[in-house]
Amino acid sequence: MDYRTLDKGTILHGRYEIEKILGKGGFGITYLAKVQGDTVCYAVKEYYPAGIVKRQQRPEGTWLYPLDESSDDEFQHGKRRFLNEAKTLKEFASLEGIVTVIDYFEEGNTAYLVMEYIDGITLKDYVQSNGTFLFSELFHLLRPLMQSLMVIHAKGYVHRDISPDNIIVGMDNQLHLIDFGAAKETNVNENHTMTVILKSGYAPPEQYLKDGKQGAWTDVYGLCATMYMALSGKAPQESIARFSEDKVCSLYDTGIRIEEWQSNAIARGMSIKSADRYRDMESLY
């Protein structure tokens, strides 16, 4: 994909100075930034749907354009969803284990989300570098995050993208859930088809369908699949492939140090059929 990133030294919103690129995704670019004259670092996420936009320099600053008229609807819809992520995160700023939003704004025909910068690495990279967790260690780290997800679900939201890529193991020895770009308010317009957003191995079958009924049980699957990886070191099989041949083994049967009832709880949370899963995070907890 073609990414034309902002230059180092670019000033956004009259105060945030771009230092370097932290990462790129299908819908955005994340930068490290500082307020001029300050030492505090921020993560600034720019709405940049690669493949359907171009960046141009204008006298007043950088500007994003859809590539053509046919891309404009998709561009505007994505920007609204991006700003919804900011609004959602702002609402949950006080919750432990949820990345804190500092600011959000529109500029140069696109949108920006300013978040606390979490010094650390993804859970996926941590496991690859340091090996797997014991169940007691992992549950201790996940407890605050699970409790925060209970609050998020109670307010009618579902994250829809819980995976080892979206959980940061911070230098503060805590887990931080990031990337609410796929978050959806489930108690509004319930009959409206949801956008298909998924991560192979961590998305349940209902996320592969535009009319799949999603709720707290969707995040239960993602969290349990994430636990499976953190405990076994292996990404689970893609959920829809499990219908024909389920290769996801019981953690207890693999010989890792885990009680059978703990293994069974994770397996139930990863049930292919949503009706067989725990219906909410409280039940899983």
Image: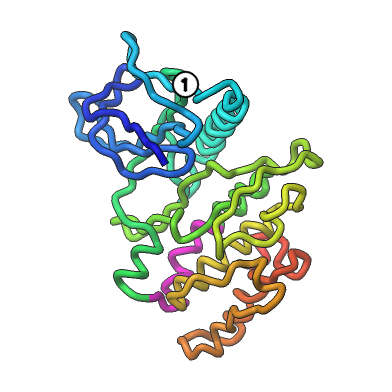
Q: Position of residue 253 (x, y in %)?
A: 55, 90
213 versus 133 height, above or below: above
First to last magenta residue range? 132-146
Q: Residue 142 at x, y = what percent?
A: 48, 63
Q: Secondary structure at mark 1?
A: strand
Residue beneath disc 1? 65
* Residue neighbourhood size for the residue with mark 1, other residues' Cα within 10 Å, grouped as few (<14), some (14–19), many (≥20): some
Residue lying at the far right in this picture: please name it: 191
Drawn side of residue 191 relative to residue 98, left or right: right
Residue 31: name its quadrant.
top left
Identify residue type, mark 1.
Answer: Tyr
Q: Describe residue 247's horizontal placement relative to residue 89 as left or right.
A: right
Q: Residue 116: name its quadrant.
A: top left
x 46%, y 74%: residue: 234
Instruction: Answer whether residue 133 is magenta in the image.
Output: yes
Residue at 75 percent across and 68 percent down: it is 273
> Residue 136 in the image: x percent, y percent?
45, 76
Above or below for 77 versus 29: above
Q: Position of residue 61 (x, y in %)?
A: 33, 15
Q: Main secondary structure of the magenta part?
A: helix
Q: Is residue 180 magenta?
A: no
